[in-house]
Amino acid sequence: MSISSAPKDVLRVGQLAMRLAEHIQSGDEFKDLWVEGEVSQARVSPAGHVYFTLRDNVGQLQCVLFASQAAQIALTPRDGTKVLAHGWVEFYHREGRCQLRIDDVRPAGAGDAFLRLEALKRRLVAEGLFAQERKRALPPAPRRVGVVTSPIGAAWRDVQTVVARRDPRVELILAPALVQGVGAVESLIGALDGLAQLRELDVVIIARGGGPSEDLAAFNDEALVRAIARFPRPVVCGVGHETDVTLADHAADLRAPTPSVAAELVVPDSTRHQVAAERLWRRIATRMREAFEGRRRRLVDARRLVERRAPPAKVAALRQRLDEDRRVIDRAVSRLVPSRRQRLLGSHRRLEALSPLKVLGRGYAIVEGADGRVRASVETLRPGEGARLRMRDGRANVTVGKVEKSG
């Protein structure tokens, strides 16, 4: 191209960048925008500003949420989440970069319900309702456990199965309640208030199986959260699946990912006492053998020393004393070993006798009524009534034919 044909209207880079910035920011087209997309490359600066990218399968846009706005927004952008972002477009002419300046972020599809829930959570946190120092420790050996759940749901069956396996001596007290839908909040609070009247109650489990977020709405209700926080005994919340976290979980003294895990956390495994006793038996037996062997070695060494150092005239007397001392020690040891062994055997038998599994193994059975509660007296049974026998290796359903009271 010759010099005479050189273009007349040539823009410098800065001029073009300034024109683009003026065009974007002078009108209203890019000042009030809602943009939906997936968050990626999110990071928070030391100053509290949040930088991230909004993208879809067509394009992507750089975004910034300054700390002043981030402090007032319930949702913090995180990688992989789909959001609705509100803001306006800015063009930085020095860097030739276009970005969306954000002043509001909402979950895509969640709407105002999510925002109300986050606002309630922040308010309860500010009150200290979820503070760690409020959490109470679970009792190490509970005897009576209250369970707030639906009597026809899988959660109640799971709790019963776990408790029966870990310690059949634990008594479960069911406080039936609705766990979803209209009236669920009032039903759950009523069940808790009823259990609060029982003096001999160690801990309470609130249980419900998994489901969509709308089915768990009752466990995000402020009234139920406060009822859990004021309950006079420790509360374990096992609601939903592992990924479901409700406000009730935060208010409880301990959160369990499922109802079964809640039962495992509340009821210790009774067989561990038998294992501990066997371990103690082996440790004591080992120490006793070591002590006996040490004494025998010292006696042998002493005898050899006497034989080397004593004059011939004293050897006989010293040997006699040595024999007498040895007989005294042998008699003491012979008395000590059976006594210690008998004490250990007695302790072992008592531990085995306390095991509910051993009791069932001797032919005994636990009688439960149709409501699942243990029947300890014939006065609680009626002819023709259905019952269930819990035995060593399972259960059997029976019908009461005749009731005969002894005495």
Image: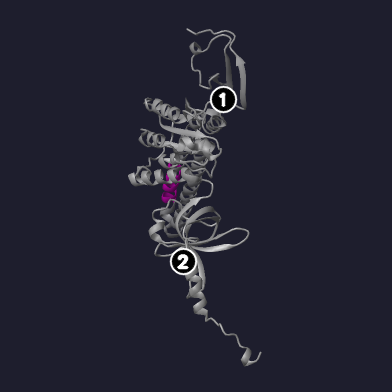
Q: Is residue 219 magenta?
A: no
Q: Nearer the viewer, residue 99 or 205?
A: 99
In magenta, the rendered stretch is 316-328
Q: Nearer the viewer, residue 227 or 399?
A: 227
Q: Which residue is mark 1?
A: 360
Q: Which residue is mark 2?
A: 25
Q: Position of residue 99 (x, y in %)?
A: 50, 65
Q: Secondary structure at mark 1?
A: helix
Residue type at mark 2 is Gln
Q: Total label count? A: 2
Q: Position of residue 55 (x, y in %)?
A: 57, 59
Q: Position of residue 211 (x, y in %)?
A: 56, 37
Task: Please identify the dominant SS of the magenta region.
Answer: helix
Cβ atoms at labels 2 and 1 below 8 Å apart: no
Question: Looking at the rendering, which quadrant does residue 60 occupy?
Answer: bottom right
Q: Is residue 327 magenta?
A: yes
Q: Nearer the viewer, residue 91 or 132?
A: 91
Q: Which scheme is used to colour this image of the protein?
A: one colour
Disc 2 packing (10 Å; few <14; some 14–19; many ≥20)? some
**Residue 230 position (above or below residue 86):** above
Question: Looking at the rendering, which quadrant does residue 48 occupy?
Answer: bottom left
